[in-house]
Every structure is written in structure tokens, then in C-alpha cells.
Amino acid sequence: MNVVRIYTGPDGKSHFEDVDLPFAPGGESNATPLRAAKGVRFNRYQPGHRVDWHPAPQRQYVVNLAGQAEIEIGDGTVRRFSPGDVLLAEDLTGQGHITRVVGNQTRVTMWVALES
């Protein structure tokens, strides 16, 4: 499984990177290392919701639970996120990205704010 990481490059623009999660055997399952988190928040966005250029408010995982969104970065690249997709948001500075809820379903996300 991989997650999509969004980060700020040296050019001050956001970039996408596909990152494989480091699963390792342990007990009854394979698992990733435990990461420290500050808190969890759930959000609901109506169809058509849009947030123009903005950086991520903090380092966080954004887990898409329902509905779909498109995220656009400075070079015009757009990635679509559907239920089950995970974004690691680390573009804390610079131009940021645009987020749009697409389709006719409410988008529900879970934000997991990470410790630095």
C-alpha cells in the first residue's frame, strides 16, 4: 500500500510523491511503525466545495472516507482521492494546493495531526 505525499519543493511549490508504507512482520499482522499523533479530526464537505491555494495547516494524514476530491498543485497536476485513499500533507509553506470536492457525494475525511 502506498500513500500520496504532498510537500513543498525548493521552488516554493507543492509536489506529489507516491510513498510505500514500510510494513514489517509483527505478531498477528504486518504493521508500520507507530507514529506519534497530536489528535484526530473528522470533516464533512459538501459537493462543489473548493479551497483555493493554501498550504497544509500542519503535518497530517488525510484519510478519505467518503466522496471524492481533486487536489491540484502549482504545475497543473491534479490527483483524485477516493474512499480509502490516504494523503500525507507536508506542504506547510509556499504556494500550497487547491482542493475541490468533485461528484455529487459529501466528502468525509479523517485528519490525523502528526507530531513533528
Image: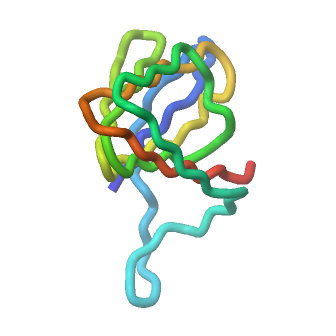
Quarter residue 80 falls in: top left
Q: Is residue 75 left or right of residue 104?
A: right
Looking at the figure, which quarter contains the N terminus?
Answer: bottom left
Q: Is residue 34 left or right of residue 93?
A: left
Task: Name the outermost residue toward the left.
Answer: 103
Residue sitting at 56 percent across and 68 percent down?
Answer: 33
Q: Relative to 8, does residue 106 appear above or below in the rendering? A: below
Residue sitting at 52 percent across and 14 percent down?
Answer: 52
Residue sitting at 30 percent across and 27 percent down?
Answer: 102
Image location (x, y in percent) of residue 92: 67, 29
Q: How many marks?
A: 0
User: Observer-nearest residue: 32 or 102?
Assistant: 102
How was the colour assigned to the protein in this rendering?
A: rainbow
Image location (x, y in percent) of residue 24: 44, 73
Q: Is residue 105 left or right of residue 39?
A: left
Residue sitting at 57 percent across and 19 percent down?
Answer: 96
Q: Relative to 11, does residue 91 appear above or below in the rendering? A: below
Image location (x, y in percent) of residue 19: 42, 45
User: Observer-nearest residue: 9 or 14?
Assistant: 14
Q: Is residue 91 left or right of residue 105?
A: right
Q: Relative to 50, does residue 105 appear above or below in the rendering? A: below
